[in-house]
Image (spheres, rainbow, N blue to C red):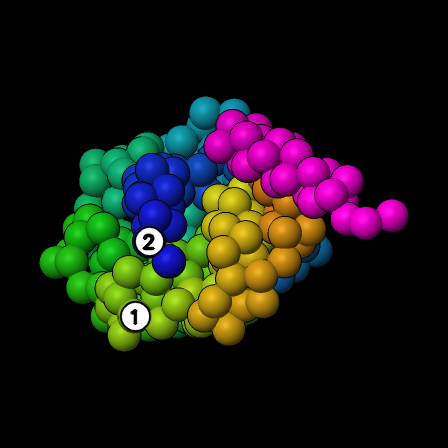
Amino acid sequence: MKGFSQYVVRVAVGFAACAALAVAASATVNAQDKPSKADDPETQTAVADYNAGNLSSALVEFHKAALRGNRLAEFNYAMMLLTGEGTTANVDEGKKWLRKAADANMSHAQYVYGKMYDDGEFVDRDPVEAHRWFLKAAQQGHVQAELALANQFLDGRGTARDNRQAFVWYKKAAEGGDMTAQYVAGSFYERGGDGVDKNLNVARAYYAAAAAQGDPAAKLKYLQLSAQLRDEHEAKPQ
């Protein structure tokens, strides 16, 4: 499937970006990873303080909740330590708390821990270790991890190259709303092969979904396939 990897690399998100966004609003954290207000009000207060710019208060509150074993607090405390927000950066301590959240089966922590090894950020690059954590998170339905895993299977990075497995995970991520995965899933259906039956109508639907999220390449593909399908329909004997 030549050409897919180049597109994926163009839209890749670095470790620092995904980590910072998760701390800021916890918006990228899967629903099952989040505590309810009743479960841990201090963690909710810490998130509110962080978003309000009260970093020193947020750091203390995250730490207290992390000591009680709250996964979201462990994760956000780790990110603040790694990035030096509200405190002097402490990479070793940050990695320790990030691993605690990942070991506690928090899918977003697993994804970010894998991303750390995939990018070689704070640790030596280790795509095999990254693959192990991406798989854990993806099996919980973490969309970014599904995309990362698909990219690894496509590139043969950290695992044997396997286009069929790549498609499985691209499709899962596409169904989860990821724009890049929608484009790549469309490409698989447009070309066919690797266990995928060629289907231009399905390909066009995936391109349309990515185009609706603002992908200009997907919009162009959608228009091209729409014209091709229209021409094929008109050429059929009536």
Give above or below for 204 relative to 161.
Answer: above
Using the image as rendered, state which of residue 83 and residue 56 is in the foreground: 83
Q: Say which element carries label 1.
A: loop
Residue 229 is a magenta residue: yes
Give above or below for 56 relative to 137.
Answer: above
Residue closest to the far right: 238
Give the quadrant of residue 38: bottom right
Q: Check disc 1: other Cα within 10 Å, few if <14, some if 14-19, many if 20+.
A: some
Span shown in magenta = 211-238
Q: Kindly tell me whether residue 39 is visible in this rendering.
A: yes
Inspect the image, locate mark 1, and give the three-letter code of the amino acid beneath it: Arg
Q: Which residue corresponds to mark 2?
A: 2
Q: Of tags 2 and 1, which is closer to the observer?
A: 2
Q: Which residue corresponds to mark 1?
A: 161
Q: Check disc 2: other Cα within 10 Å, few if <14, some if 14-19, many if 20+.
A: few
Q: In the picture provided, is 214 more to the left or to the right than 36? A: left
- Horizontal and vertical percent for residue 182? 56, 48
